[in-house]
Amino acid sequence: MSSPSVTAAEAVDSGARRRPMPPELSATILAVAAVLVGGILGMPVYGVFLGWAAASLARRGGIPSRVVLLCLAAGGVLGAATLAATAVVAPLLGPNAPEWLSAVLSLAVANPILILLGRLRAFAAVPAMFIGFSTLLAVHLGSTHELTDGLLGALLVASATNLAGVGVNWLGERMTRLHGPSGSPGAPPRDSRLKP
């Protein structure tokens, strides 16, 4: 009985396939690297993880990375604008007004703007805007405040860490992806609910 013939291209293709790195391993390697780099540079690592999460969730929804980056940045800018507005509104409310009132009023304006921006295709990843907003607040109000030197510094640190997170997500995908056409044993599974 003769064995089926294999073309040279098929032999090369099957030899070129490699087993992917399991996501548990690649995610662990990247997480440890992010913590090490963050610790060495004194940067808030949570911004990296939040950027990573935003990119991962958006990818599952078919949203391109460029939209995620734009939304993270827009959220950070809106967060900085909200903090700046809070500082301006507080004195206008008078000395007897509770401290949180100016934040509530500023947020009541910023939040609808953020949601309305999400109606535009370029800002279609609303959760990424909230992540950028939250990262900015955490950097400005958190333990890394001495790194930032004000709102602009906080915005730069928050944006840099979120950007690093998107990069880590991209790198993690490359580490776990097998080369091969979609649907082949070497390709990551496709969710039929997502558009190609």
Image: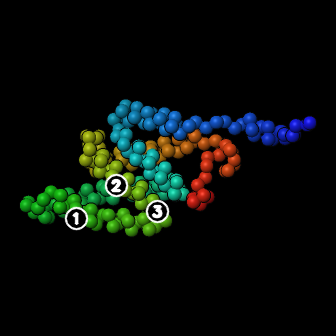
Q: Residue at the far right: name it.
A: 1
Alpha-carbon distance for marks 1 and 3?
25 Å
Mark 3 and mark 2 residues within 8 Å of each other at the beta carbon: no
Find disc 2 in the rendering and name its residue.
133
Q: For the point 52% across and 34% down, which residue is it?
A: 25
**Numbered badge on residue 105:** 1
Q: Residues within 10 Å of mark 2 (few under 14, many from 20)?
A: many
The alpha-carbon separation of the residues under discs 3 and 2 comes to 15 Å
Horizontal and vertical percent position of residue 114: 36, 63
Please state which amino acid type lies under the numbered disc 2.
Phe
Residue identified by numbered label 3: 124
Residue extending farthest to the front is 1
In front: 146, or 117?
A: 117
- Evaluate if marks 1 and 2 touch, with contact meaning CB atoms under 8 Å apart: no
| Element carrying mark 3 | loop
Whether residue 163 appears in this view of the structure is no
